[in-house]
Image (cartoon, coloured by chain):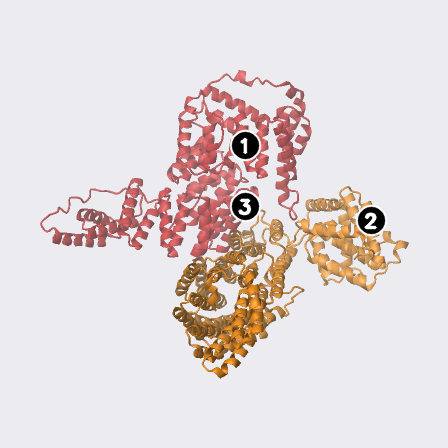
Chain colours: A red, B orange
Amino acid sequence: MADITKCDLTKVKTDLILAHRKCSERRLLNSAKWAAEMSQAVTKEINLNELIQPQYRKDFCDEFDKYTVATTYFDLKEYGRAAREVEKCKSSQGYFLYMYSRYLADEKKRLDNSSDSIGPVEQEDKNLKTLHIELQKKHLAKELDGFGLYLFGVVLRKLELNKTAVEVLVESVNQEPLHWGSWQELALLITDRQMLNSLELPDHWVKQLFLANVYLELQLNEEPLKIYQSFLDNGFMKSKYIISQIAISYHNMREIEQAVKAFKQLHKLDPCRLENMDIYSNLLYVKEMGGDLADLAHHSCEIDKYRVETCCVIGNYYSLRGQHEKAVLYFQRALKLNPHYLSSWTLMGHEYMEMKNTSAAIQAYRQAIEVNKRDYRAWYGLGQTYEILKMPTYSLYYYMRAQQLRPNDSRMVVALGECYEKLERLVEAKKCFWKAHSVGDVEGMALLKLAKLYDRLQDEDQAASAYIEYISKMETQGFAKFEEQGQAYKYLANYYRSRKQWDEAYAAAQKCVEFLETREEAKAILKTIQTERGITESNIHVDMDASTGSITMERHPLVPSDTPLGRITPTALRFTP
Amino acid sequence: MSGTDLFTFNTFGKRPMKEQVTPHKLSVLILVHKYQTLRLPTILHEGLMDDSLEEIVFTENEKRDFMTTILDLLQSSDIELKELRAKLHGVVKPVVLDFFFDKLKEIHDDGLQPIMKFFHDINDLVSHDSESKPFISKYSVLGFFFRRMILAFNKLSFSQVTELWAKIKHYYELCFPNNEPEADLAKSLTDSVMSLSGTGGPLTKSCLAQSFEGLQISENTVGGFYSQKQAEYFIAQQASLLHHNESKALSPRKLQDKITVILKANKDLAEAHFLSYLNSLRVKEYCTAIHNLYHYYDRNAKISSTSTTAKDKEDLSIRYAALNVAALHFRFGHHGEAMASLIESIHKAQEVNDHVCLQHALAWLQRFGQQGVAAMAHLIEKSITRSEDLSLPYLTSLGVQVLARHNAFVFEKPASVFEYLEYSDILNCQNFLTGMIQVSYTQKSALWHLFGKSELSSMSSLLVLNLDTIESGVSDNTELSCIALCNLAEKHAERGQYQIATDLLNHAKLRFPVDCVDSHHWMKSEQQINFDRMLNNRKWNLVEQAVINLRVVAEDESNLRNAIYLCEKGEATQAFNQLQKLLEDMKDTTDGKELDFQCRVLLAMSRLYINTGNHTTAIIHVLDCISKARSHHMNYFIAIASVQLAFIQYHMKLPEQALGLLERNMLPVLTNGSIYDQARTLYCYARVQVACARHSQQDKKSALLSAVSVMNLVIELFKKVEAHHRVKDGVYYQARLYNDLGYTAERNKCAHDFKQLDQQHPTLNQMSINAF
């Protein structure tokens, strides 16, 4: 039953409800929340009475008192105390709670201490290591259930033993396919598609959601959309999770309109939901929808002002208003709330750029890299900063790093290409633009730049074909820059004229007239075509008006206006955090 | 919101503390405190008043030892208690040690209270509040240290104090794991008493073991808890060592470990990245080097609000960043990249009219650019004048030296070249540029070698090694010393003193281990010396080995030597192909730096023609070589090429001309040439003399007699360089001479010698018979 279309929804809902109970028994709150939300989305009648009757095993019943006390302590965030209560428990719930509270107690202590620590703590991961050893013993004895394996996987990941972590997590999802936390942990460890295909995953409908999630991370945006759509069509009409994921995939695809629409829908469905609102605010920022952003900021602030997402939304709002100092303050606050919230550093870097304080921007980006070496946005930001400082050679290094991390992102390749172009290394630049075009050009600039480059290299045929492809692409996508398109037609007109392909030249010149900047030149070209044609083919008469007005362009000016760099500003470069 | 808050780059919005109380520092505090209280019983606290303490008197020597030890402890990085104990062992009186360990144990056992009290107590040592003078001057090294520590401690929040205590506990338990220090301590105390009481005490096994143990600790531990001050000191020290004497610095691996520790403790210490960059350069690790360099300059950027002065500073670092990247690329041989970065640096410098940076860039430009081009000379001259105006003596001196070198390659007279170097020497003297003085001597050594004065070259090399460069206890051990050593080794080998040459090379190996950056110099020299020696010895397989080994460090040189080897072995065609290729390559390079190499290729070619009996063609190459050498004032090459020409003339039955030529050119060869060259020249001279004398009967006898005596010398010289086949040659010729003279007995003796030599070293090919 791998496909959601073939699943029995009643069964799905029953499974979800049971999964929720299992998770909440073990105080895996996020997974429980996910299961509950998904279950809520499925509107099917089921016999609840049967389900609600719990069937507990004997060992659990023996330890019930201890377990109950521990859970209350746990809920009150007294993790150490909770762990003490269930120390000797044998039942799977009790044991898991014991290990889990120990893990959380350690995490909490570390987070609390990190703010006023003196120097490095020598045995930072001492507790993690003891946990690791104990869990490993259990694992070897095959005494861990799906949840225990999950915790083991988490500990392994923390200790950066990624390979083993993947194995353990795969085992975990095979045992408990409906525990979403395991899938999420697993998704974080997957670096490429090949690795994904090599995993032995259970044949379960959740797998589809997992795949979609991983594809999103890997920026393969078309596929998750398909999967999510099939879920939407098959009973999960109102699932907040799926709608939010769809919004994110639109955002990744830079389909801003669609993404905003999806987020609006999500917001309406659950006004108090703050998750992913930072991405929504990024979208609103890029679209410069100040009013909506203000509303969102206001709303989020009222719900919970000490949430990372809220800080991010407010930061974005201030940034849009041009109050960059305040924006920086809010991003800093986000970092204080959650030191792992990486994109805050990058966003801060963008703000400093707006404040024209390049060195501060460099520092912020560097911090981002220090926290996570694979943060390509920060590398890109650094490259851009140095490019603004007019140091293309220097920025090459950073762009290369960014491009290495995101080999299939055209923006990085285009940036690299432009640097090469500035350094007059045209062959490399050509390769870059070509690559940008072939990996699916996000900004639609690569072809144009390629064409201009061919023109500079005096490879006219290539230049012309690049222009043609550019124009056809613009026409199909339906948005364009007038100026650029005019230039393209002008080039084509001249190209055909020199080839004496009069009809094509004439058509191109005609289109050229439609654009304001090139109108006068186009008219001149038309005239020369007329006379030259008259000389070569004096006896053929052409009806001049035959082809005019037949083509109308649809125009959607969407791309923000040019910056000195001739491409989007660093602040407009918002990605999924 | 304040302006500074905006630019704090820390997750918690706080600047990290510069100074911290660490267990090690607490130990030092306790030590000093105990020492003071014992030394001056007047300040003894009531509780410590004890009869047993009265007799403690510190001699001046003990005081001095204690103080130097403390200073050492203050400046070095944190160490573990075990290591500290080993260090204090024998330096500090057992009583002090006793108290010291008691106090530590008290803190360890009783928790926070003793620490708090201790810091309260030591306040009295430095504070002024009592009428009497403080016991430690406020402004002394220790005073500063005490006050810094007290301040740092007072700043700690309660939870931080508990953290500190936990650290102290850990620190203490590492030394006394079973929480039972007494037994161990007693032993160490008796040991220390022993070493104090006697004159050094008997060297027992346990003593040795202990000192060894101490050493091992310092090797193994990755080193303590760095505060920023300590880290800065460490970085500065290591960087200076890397610059002056690499072997004294930590090994690359250990240094990298240390850097990792430092960075863990001080995330914001950008200098550590730079040290890491230097360390990577040492092991020629390109990727890490470039990452570190970029990282350093990113982090190094001065944070500022928009004030203009700070803005300048920020630009400054960017300019030098680009410059350093250029240098890095150049080091790894990426010339295009280097040039691009350099140009960028120049652009940035020009934007803000930073002449100092521009001069540095110009100096690099000279290095990157084509050597021996007129435009380059112009560039250097401009750079010199500008540097002088900006009072940058280092760059001026460097520029002058570069110009001297440049002139040496473009037909300038040696006198003018050395005039420039003298000017550089004056600058070096005036500005105390020790490094540049060494460079200057090395340069001179190379130039004398080029101009064919081997004695002067050796002397300059000796001067490089002889310079007093000791700075804060560390003498220089740079690439220059390695070059000097190699040069001397080669010169000795030329004189047949192979043993000394080997000793010199071994010394170089010791000072520059194989993994050292400069090791390729001695590798090259070693192989070249081996090659020459084995070629003379006719040990073909070893010669071949030397050629192969040489290829790793110097490809062109290896190719030339391969050709010579093939020629000697008699494989004329292959030798010819190799030489032909080298000649073709030479045509492409306009670089002046390989002048002597070019001459040697030409000579080798001509020798190949001589050996194959094609004298007319040989002349062309010899003449080519002479003209080249003459235009660049390379006296030795003029001389040796002329001698070779004379040899050709002799074979072409023009002995009179040959004699004239020889008499004119023998002197430089005999004064500066290698033993082998000298022998060859004299051999040739003897033959030419005899050939000239054949015409008149009267002179013949005297000519023959003098030739015999010359040949004695020749044979001796050939023997010295182990060239047995040439000895054989010489003996044969001497036999012929005796025969002509009619001295049968002597003739037979020579013939006998020849017979014996021929059995040992049979002639294998006919090419070597006519060899020069």
| Element assignment for label 1 | helix
**Residues under labels 2 and 1: Cα distance?**
53 Å
The foreground one among A34 and A448 is A448
Residue type, numbered disc 3: Val
Residue where numbered disc 3 is placed: A371
Q: Residue furthest right?
A: B51
> From the viewer's perspective, is B215 left or right of A407?
right
Discs 2, 1: same chain: no
> From the viewer's perspective, is B126 left or right of A103?
right
Chain at tag 2: B
Q: Residue at x 47, y 25 (%)?
A: A203
Q: Residue furthest bottom?
A: B698
* Rendered image quadrant of residue A69: top right
Res A187 visible: yes
Residue type, numbered disc 2: Lys
> From the viewer's perspective, is B590 left or right of B447?
left
Q: Residues within 10 Å of mark 3 (few under 14, many from 20)?
A: some
> From the viewer's perspective, is A206 left or right of B62?
left
Residue where numbered disc 2 is placed: B187
Q: Residue furthest left?
A: A539
Residue A167 is labelled as: 1
Res B427 visible: no
